[in-house]
Image: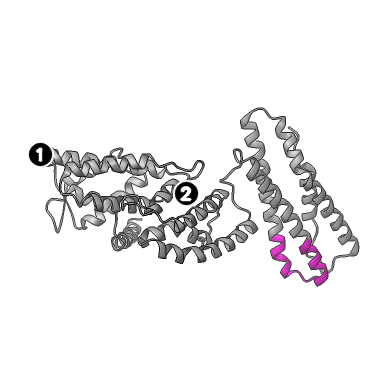
Amino acid sequence: MTYPLAKFDELVAALLAFKMQEAELSSETLKNLYALLQQTADEAEHVRAGLLQEIMGIRKKKALTLFIQNFQTACVAIADKMYVHLYTMQSLSIDKNTAGEIVHYYKAILEKVDDILYFIEIHFTKYFDRMQKLPVHYYIRWRQKIYHALAALKPSMHLRFKDILLVETALQPFEQFIQPLEGKDFCYHDLIYLKNLLPALQQQIQNEDTSDDMFDVLTRCLLTMDFNSSHFINHCMEKWKKKIAESDDKNEQITHWFICKKNLCQISVQPHLKLMVTKDSAIKILGNYINEEIQILQSENSNELRDTSVQHQPEHKIFHFTLPVSQIAILLRLLVEAGFIKAQNQTDFLKRVAMVIQTDKTSMVSAESLRNKYYAPERNQLLSVKDLLFNLIKFMKRLE
């Protein structure tokens, strides 16, 4: 397989080899530098054609994907190197006119590389590696754009929608993008998702449709965009449970849950979009939770939970906890999500745990109470568990 950018890579490597730390650059050095940059620019103009010719000769999808992604990785690495040199130019003690010329050259290369990456992203979307990290300069540029877009979007969202928590949840990915955690690298997937989510939210502000409380326009929009964050999932379930619980009849509640699931499955999700790639889709997760709600109501309706509790209670040893139920639920959630406890049916798992524990405040823990605190932990209890875990680490040090 011929690599169409071999010459391009050689030129950039030679460019990076220049000793920019010299106090003054000679006219001969500048002349050679200019010649290399000119060749690099000329070569970059032919990258598109070379890439297309190379792809035409590739028959296997795997080989094509590898080719595109390797080329993409090389372009990102080149762009980051150019940015580092641009950033360090401020500390170089060279003539301002000379520095200005060099900065111009570096910017020219960055612009060419950007054109190439954008070309691959648009015309070879199927093979483009969305999990590849964003070039630093590219992220900085888009962070500014997202910052200004968020400044305009946020007040409009709060005016349009009454559900403040849902609005904050929808805007959270934008907040994280402009204020990243230390050491956090964003990838193309993150930016592509935000570039699709932004116009979708802007459109909902203009949408005058007033849907019911179960599926308001903002909730539908986020489901369509496969907004599968835990905050959004938990918020939907709590909102739906509160709405359905307004009916005292369990059969009627079961019917409402089935209708909710039907409406959920009818939502058309945008292809190739998902907030968190490693998690299941929002509709699948919510569908599983709805199934659990239906199972619980059906069991309660036939008195199975009560009969099982009475029948098996003498056979089980009761474990006494000094912790409240809310903190026990959080610890169980941590163990399950970390993979230390395997529980395929979490409803059954929590039911069995509730049968064998008691606390200082209650001699019989309700499975429903444990389950509610498991899926919707309170913030103050999360902080208490965090302190508890730190104390456990201190105790562990005593054992060393």
Span highlighted in magenta in the image: 84-104
Q: Is residue 111 magenta?
A: no
For marks 2 and 1, give the CA distance: 43 Å
In the image, taking residue 377 as reference, residue 188 lies left or right, namely: right
Quadrant including the N terminus: top right
Question: Residue 275 bears which disc, if any?
Answer: 2
Q: Is residue 77 left or right of residue 154?
A: right
Looking at the image, is 87 positioned above or below residue 45? below
Question: How is the structure coloured here?
Answer: one colour
Residue furthest out toward the top: 59
Mark 1 crowd level (few <14, some 14–19, many ≥20, 10 Å Cα): few
User: Taking 333 as reference, is 114 left or right?
Assistant: right
Residue at 64 percent across and 28 percent down: it is 60
Q: Nearer the viewer, residue 78 or 228?
A: 228
Residue depicted at 45% across the width and 42% down the height: 269
- Percent across and percent down for residue 62 are 61, 31
